[in-house]
């Protein structure tokens, strides 16, 4: 690699201020095989007009990333006129109907979330969703609820009121609950208690979200950084190319490190006595990749290319070990 070529490649690189690249802000989604799979499953639920389903998994496994991806991709795949909204369940000491509906209005982007008493807010939630369904021409709405393991039975009753309001107006609503494994336990308990209405409305389908378990899954993820990411938009500069322009120009790709990365995770687990089933939460794989790019790439030490030791330091710096030790104790 000549010095002239290095200089030419670097000069052509887009100018992005340090701290503003998506790798540094975290404002991006690279789909893993698991994210692609759950997207396909949810899309099938929607197409078949399921009333509701649950997606559950351990913390930091990648569910929130999957939600971001689905919010972006499902409208493209099923039509932009399909209304898709999301909300996040807060943790309340005492559930309040007034606060619950206000947060729904807030998360849905309603212009006046705080005005009026609880019954007025509930009516605005119903009317807002009915209007969305009618305007779309499909007479349907899809609602994702994140952190859904926090929902209590009373809140399910309030959601059922909304569901019934829409049903009376001829609008069908599909509710997708996303949360931790407790969500499955809640479903099991409700089955035992014969809470048929809640199960039938919101929990007819289920999907367990998994972390990364194989070299192939890691390679799929890394290929996203190599080929299917771009910043600035329409610049032609993938994330890998931006942080390692000379190496990329010479044919190097992050996907070449798939075996290296999984072995680093395995070695680190062994060194720390972590013997539970091997599974890399998406958050820690993503953080490891970001640390490697930020520390060793163009905004860091400007190394020519990454080494095994760079990956090891990145995994250790991601918080993966501390998280796995904690998960082994609970």
Image (spheres, rainbow, N blue to C red):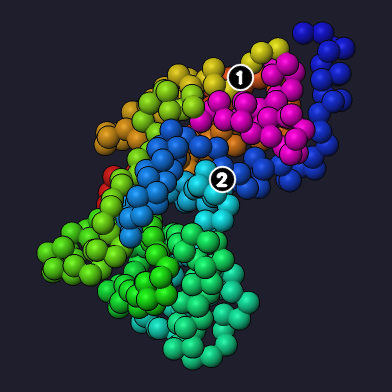
* Mark 1 vs 2, N-terminal side: 2
Left or right: residue 315 versus residue 228 is: left
| Image spot of residue 65 (x, y percent) | 50, 47
| Secondary element at tag 1 | loop
Farthest residue toward the bottom? 117
Residue at the spot x=67%, y=32% of the render? Answer: 239
Queried whether the magenta region covers residue 149, the answer comes back as no
Does the CB distance between marks 1 and 2 fall below 8 Å? no
- Given residues 127 and 240, the one toward you in this image is 127
- Given residues 201 and 89, the one toward you in this image is 201
Queried whether the magenta region covers residue 230, the answer comes back as yes
- Looking at the rendering, the stretch of residues picked out in magenta corresponds to 221-249
| Residue at which label 1 appears | 253
Tell me if residue 265 comes above or below residue 249 in the rendering. Answer: below
Tell me if residue 157 comes above or below residue 146 in the rendering. Answer: below
Farthest residue toward the top? 1
The quarter holding residue 290 reads top right
- Given residues 234 and 259, the one toward you in this image is 234
Q: What numbered label is drawn on residue 76?
A: 2
């Amino acid at each position: 690699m000549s010095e002239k070529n290095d200089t030419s490649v670097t000069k052509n690189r887009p100018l992005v201020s340090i701290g503003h690249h998506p790798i540094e802000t975290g404002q991006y989604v690279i789909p893993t095989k698991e994210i692609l799979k759950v997207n396909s499953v949810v899309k099938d639920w929607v197409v078949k007009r399921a009333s509701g389903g649950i997606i559950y998994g351990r913390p930091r496994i990648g569910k929130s990333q999957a939600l971001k991806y689905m919010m972006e991709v499902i409208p493209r795949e099923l039509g932009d006129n399909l209304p898709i909204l999301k909300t996040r369940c807060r943790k309340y000491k005492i559930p309040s109907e007034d606060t619950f509906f206000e947060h729904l209005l807030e998360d849905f982007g309603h212009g006046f979330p705080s005005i009026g008493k609880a019954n007025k807010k509930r009516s605005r939630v119903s009317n807002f969703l009915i209007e969305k369904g009618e305007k779309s021409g499909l007479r349907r709405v899809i609602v994702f609820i994140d952190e859904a393991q926090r929902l209590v039975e009373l809140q399910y009753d309030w959601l059922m009121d909304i569901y019934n309001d829409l049903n009376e107006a001829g609008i069908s609503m599909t509710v997708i609950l996303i949360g931790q494994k407790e969500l499955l336990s809640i479903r099991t308990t409700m089955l035992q208690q014969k809470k048929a209405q809640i199960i039938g409305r919101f929990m007819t389908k289920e999907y367990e979200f998994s972390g990364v378990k194989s070299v192939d899954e890691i390679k799929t993820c890394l290929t996203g950084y190599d080929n299917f990411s771009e910043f600035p938009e329409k610049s032609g500069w993938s994330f890998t190319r931006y942080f390692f322009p000379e190496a990329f120009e010479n044919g190097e790709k992050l996907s070449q490190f798939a075996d290296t990365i999984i072995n680093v995770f395995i070695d680190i687990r062994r060194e720390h006595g972590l013997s539970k089933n091997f599974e890399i939460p998406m958050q820690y794989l993503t953080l490891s990749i970001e640390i490697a790019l930020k520390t060793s790439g163009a905004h860091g030490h400007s190394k020519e290319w990454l080494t095994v030791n760079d990956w090891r330091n990145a995994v250790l710096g991601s918080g993966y070990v501390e998280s796995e030790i904690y998960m082994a104790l609970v």
